[in-house]
Amino acid sequence: MKRCLLDSLRQSRAGQRLGENDAWQVAVAECMDADLVGHDRAFAALGARYDDHRRP
């Protein structure tokens, strides 16, 4: 429950909100203590937990 509240707080403070699908991907990755890999600026707010595979 605490994690859901933190995710909700992150969404409300974000300049660019995540879509429903993106929010699910973040929630699942956090539950698995995993990083997200992709190429989408929306996930940049995750900081070190996000790896942009196209970044040099």
Image: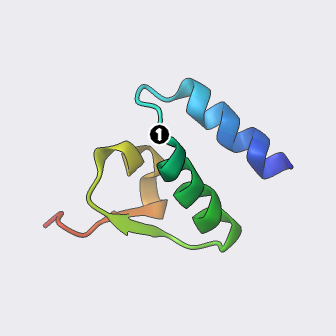
Residue found farthest to the right:
1
Question: For this view, does 45 lie left or right of residue 33?
Answer: left
Q: Secondary structure at mark 1?
A: loop
In depth, the one of 28 and 34 nearer the eye is 28
Given the image, on which type of amino acid does mark 1 rest? Answer: Leu
Question: Quadrant of the image for the C terminus?
Answer: bottom left
Q: Which quadrant holds residue 6?
A: top right
Q: Residues within 10 Å of mark 1 (few under 14, many from 20)?
A: some
Q: Is residue 21 above or below residue 29?
A: above
In depth, the one of 14 and 18 nearer the eye is 18
Q: Which quadrant holds residue 29?
A: bottom right
Residue at 66% from the left image edge and 74% from the top image edge? 32
* Count of numbered circles in the view: 1
Point out residue 30 in the picture as x, y percentages from the top left corner.
Answer: 64, 63
Q: How is the image coloured?
A: rainbow
Point out residue 40 in the picture as x, y percentages from the top left corner.
Answer: 29, 52
Residue at 26% from the left image edge and 59% from the top image edge? 39
Point out residue 2 in the picture as x, y percentages from the top left corner.
Answer: 84, 47
In depth, the one of 21 and 13 nearer the eye is 21
Residue at 45% from the left image edge and 60% from the top image edge? 48
Question: For this view, does 27 lie left or right of residue 19?
Answer: right
Q: Is residue 9 above or below residue 25?
A: above
Point out residue 1 in the picture as x, y percentages from the top left corner.
Answer: 86, 49
Residue beneath disc 1: 18
Residue found farthest to the left:
56
Q: Is residue 41 above or below residue 11?
A: below
Q: Which quadrant holds residue 34?
A: bottom right
Question: For this view, does 12 lie left or right of residue 4?
Answer: left
